[in-house]
Image (cartoon, helix red, strand yellow):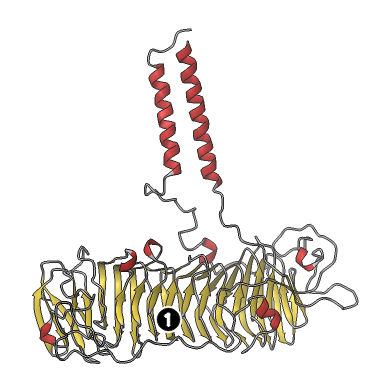
Amino acid sequence: MASHKYIDRICWGIVALTLAVTLLFMNGKALGLTAVAPEGEDEMFTANDLTADYDRSAATRISLNGESAQVQGNGAYFYQGDVYIVSPGKYVLSGAIDDGSVIVQAEGDDKIWLYLDGVDLSCSDGAALDIEQAGKVFLTLGDGTVNRLSAGESYSQEAVSAGIDGTIYSRDDLTIQGSGQLTVEGTYCHGIVCNDDLVITGGSLDIQAAQDGLHANDSVRIREADIVIRAGDDGATAQNDEETGFFYMESGSLAVSECYEGIEAVCVTIAGGTLDLAPTDDGVNATGTGEAGYIRVSGGDIRIRNAAGRDADGLDSNGSIYLEGGSVFISLNGQGGNLAIDYGSEYGGICRIDGGTLLACGSNTMAEAISADSSQGFLMEGVTGQAGCRVTLEAGGQTLLTEEVPYEFTCLIVSAPGLRVGDSCTLTVGESQQTYTVDNSSDAVSAFGQMGGRFGGFGGGMQLPEGEAPSGGDAPAGMEPPSGGLGEAPSLPEGTVPQDGGGQRPQRGPGVEGEDSGDQNPNGGMEGRWPAFGGGRGNLQGQLPEGDGQLPGRQLQTEREAPVSMERNWTAVLLVGVSALILGIGLAVALCFRRR
């Protein structure tokens, strides 16, 4: 048998190509390749997250009547003051419950839509909405409706032992959507808690909470929603024990008028929307260190104001800060260690300004330098400004920025689109004005990391801690030590539980017996796949089964199944397997022809 004279080269070429493809799939992320999201999804929101107008003609309807409820349809029932939802599908709720909960206890892959059509839920000893198990729950605020969920000042021992710590509490993914209004009152602990991903894509939310307003383990994602929060601790938190969790805002508004910290997460991305934060400590805090933690602003309008903080920051990252677009305004009082911008330089973090408008006013004590290689020009000056003064930046005959600053300050960082290294610009603070050339230098930062005050025309100079002096000599006369001490974290209400959302999963409600319908439709009968309640699912039609009435109430399991820490990507496995198969065939053909 004759062979082609170039068969060796062809076979080895196939082998080389196969190896290259295999390595590409194995190292695609490291090489900068990104996966394309399935149609109907983007990186942060699914099609279902964004679709609040869906067909409710076949939905189960639940009418709440103070101390009772009527259920028309399948998949739900009322028992001892609580509404139980146990099947996937769509549900429409209306009316009020004086003291009870809506409890979701479905299967781990069930999707459930709860449409609130004017609902008032109040529970004195636990969560008003308690999502114990489901694949994902979509809480839809009906167009033009006003809804209210509230909880008491203390929870039952069963709820505390189970780790339930929010007025709305979900152990699984939760999406809030629609165009109606929702008031959440959490006088015991948090307002809205989600142990997985909390997505808010619509509605007007007014949240009052003794601790966090929004509290999620994995992520908080906001789009096209208007949210107002008053919280005893953080406005919004997204982090867990594994030190992961992120906050993402794309559009809408978030106003936190009372809080300790405004936003806290391992990493924070703000791509759009308006944020108005009034914390007593940090405005935005990224807790992850090194590459794991960052604050990235690529759009939106962010305003952070803190009148009385001590050792408080505007933007505070244990990693890096990237300012790429949008508008950021920060006003902290200029005393103590109140840094308008603080980042983890000790962990290798950086702060770059590559776009957007920035005016950050705070203390000159321990101020850190901005990266000199930022692509947009900036000024960082040790300068004293009085409360209520106006700051204006002009260049090229145009006003790039003007803003009234409510609180006194001793350090100023300013940048705007159109400001470039080498430009001549004029900065006006109150009645004082200075013109100079932008060089993005860090000369204003001393060896202490404190502002050296090279903008002497405004006076002020450094404020150093008592007893400290710049390297190379004694402290100049007139330098004043900062007043006050470190701020104290607010005390938590008596009897509160940790904020990690952990604990036992309660096993609640009666066992339900009845014929197994075998129906898998969203609002069909109970298919006998409800082991936690000890009975097959019958076609309830809102009724309890016949019996002696001695049905178990809320009981607690001792533990919850641990989440899977890693998901296998079967597409990648298939591709690698095909590559390996081609490689084997190529080698076999090459060896065969070589012997012949």
Q: Amino acid at mark 1?
A: Glu
Relative side of 314 to 386, left or right: right
The image quadrant of residue 369 is bottom left
Q: Position of residue 25 (x, y in %)?
A: 45, 42
Vertical arrangement, residue 151 with respect to residue 517, above or below: below
Q: Position of residue 130 (x, y in %)?
A: 65, 76
Vertical arrangement, residue 102 with respect to residue 353, above or below: below
Vertical arrangement, residue 151 with respect to residue 253, above or below: below
Residues 184 and 293: in front is 293
Res 33 visible: yes
Q: Position of residue 176 (x, y in %)?
A: 54, 73
Secondary structure category for the residue under label 1: loop
Would you call the spot at circle 1 few (<14 residues within 10 Å), some (14-19), or many (20 or more)? many
Vertical arrangement, residue 571 with respect to residue 528, above or below: above
Residues 441 and 10: in front is 441
Residues 53 and 334: in front is 334
Query: Looking at the image, which residue is at 65% across and 60% down?
Result: 109
Res 525 visible: no
Q: Position of residue 402 (x, y in %)?
A: 21, 82
The image quadrant of residue 277 is bottom left
Query: Looking at the image, which residue is at 56% across and 67% down?
Result: 196
Q: On the image, numbered disc 1 is attached to which residue? A: 261
Relative side of 289 to 108, left or right: left
